[in-house]
Each structure stands twice: as C-alpha cells, then as structure tokens.
Amino acid sequence: MDRRRKFWGWGYEDQRLTPGEERMIRAIGASQFKVAQFEETPVPTVGEIALRRPRLSIPRALAGILTTDPHERLLHTYGRSLKDYIRVFARDFRPAPDLVAYPQSAGDVAAVLAWAADENAAIIPFGGGTSVVGGIEADIGDGFSGAVSLDLGKLARVVEIDDVSRAARIEAGILGPALEPRSNRPA
C-alpha cells in the first residue's frame, strides 16, 4: 500500500516527531514569540473538515485520472508556509480544489487540459506540493467553473542527463530526496 502524505504538514501520515523534538520545537517557538508556553492545537482530521461540494463532475474518459477524494483535495489546498499552516490548523480549507488529477503521461496531461478548457476550469499545477509562496492555492475567483489541482507526482523521472553540460531534463513531479542520489553521478 502507498504511504499517504500528510495534508496538514510535511511528510507521511506514519511519521511523527519524537517527544524530544516536540519539546525542542515548543521551546524554540516560545522563545521566538516571547510566550511562556504554546497551547497545542490537535492535528486536523479529514472527517472534521467541511469541504465545499465539487463544482465539476468527473467525465467518464478521465475517471482513472481525476478524483474528488477529500484527503486528496485537502492535501492539494495549501503549500507548506507558515500562513498555510495557520489556515490548516484553523481548519480553513475554503480554497480547496474541486478535483485532483493524477496524470501518468504527457497524453494524460493533454487530455486533462483539453477537458478543463472545454469546462472553463482553472488548472493549478502541483509538483512536490512544497510551495511556500501560495503557488498551489486554488483561489480562482468567480471567472472559472471550478479548479483542478494537476498533481505531477506520477511524472517523476529523470529523463536524461547531459554529462558534459551537467544539464538535465527532469519531470515536474520528482521530489528533491528522490533526485539527490541521481545528481551525485561521477563526472
């Protein structure tokens, strides 16, 4: 079974900080914000978040690529900035995308883009999901019929490396830790 990424923080659902790491973070935060101690806010759960109903319907031709799964919509709502975390822990997921797309090929990407153009749906690219600048947020206003997060995580290959120029062609969904071992090739 695939590990699920946390929608409320870095890493996977089965990963937690040690008690020592938690104490250290609380102490640093209390010192930084000049408070005696932080009140802990429980980690949000999928069941307690009220998501808006999707404004878009999944067409039969893209049923294997698109999903309305609540966890996936939550995961694709925000990046990983402090502002994002504040909204996550306040349980504010108003800008959640209506659908999440998981293309596995360039043809899948083209099919999703063509369908979205016909439906007047906004496409929000999602690479690793680590944005700290609001780049993955589906705050689209009223000019679109809905928003689709285009998750490129299944397009995560190093296509080619030019050893002379040290240039590489890499698909958009690869995460840094998966890329690093491939970048340490001898010249």
Image (cartoon, grey):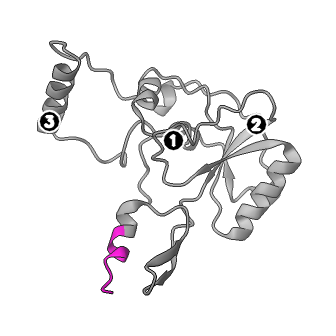
In the image, residue 7 above or below residue 87? below
- In the structure shown, which secondary structural element does the residue marked by tag 2 occupy? strand
Assign the N terminus to one quadrant of the image: bottom left
* Type of amino acid at the residue the image marks with label 3: Pro
Measure how far apart labels 3 and 1 are at the Cα level. 25 Å
User: Which of the 4 quarters of the picture holds residue 41?
Assistant: top left
- Mark 3 or mark 1: which comes first in sequence? 3
| Residue at the (56%, 44%) spot, across then down | 72
User: Which of the 4 quarters of the picture holds residue 113?
Assistant: bottom right
In this rendering, position of residue 94 left or right of residue 75 = right
* Type of amino acid at the residue the image marks with label 2: Gly
Label placed on residue 146:
2
User: Magenta region: which residues?
Assistant: 180-187
Q: Which residue is mark 1?
A: 75
Percent position of residue 54, x then y: 72, 34
Measure how far apart labels 1 and 2 are at the Cα level. 17 Å
Q: Which residue is mark 3?
A: 19
Q: Pointers 3 and 2 in contact (CB under 8 A)?
A: no
Percent position of residue 102, x then y: 62, 57
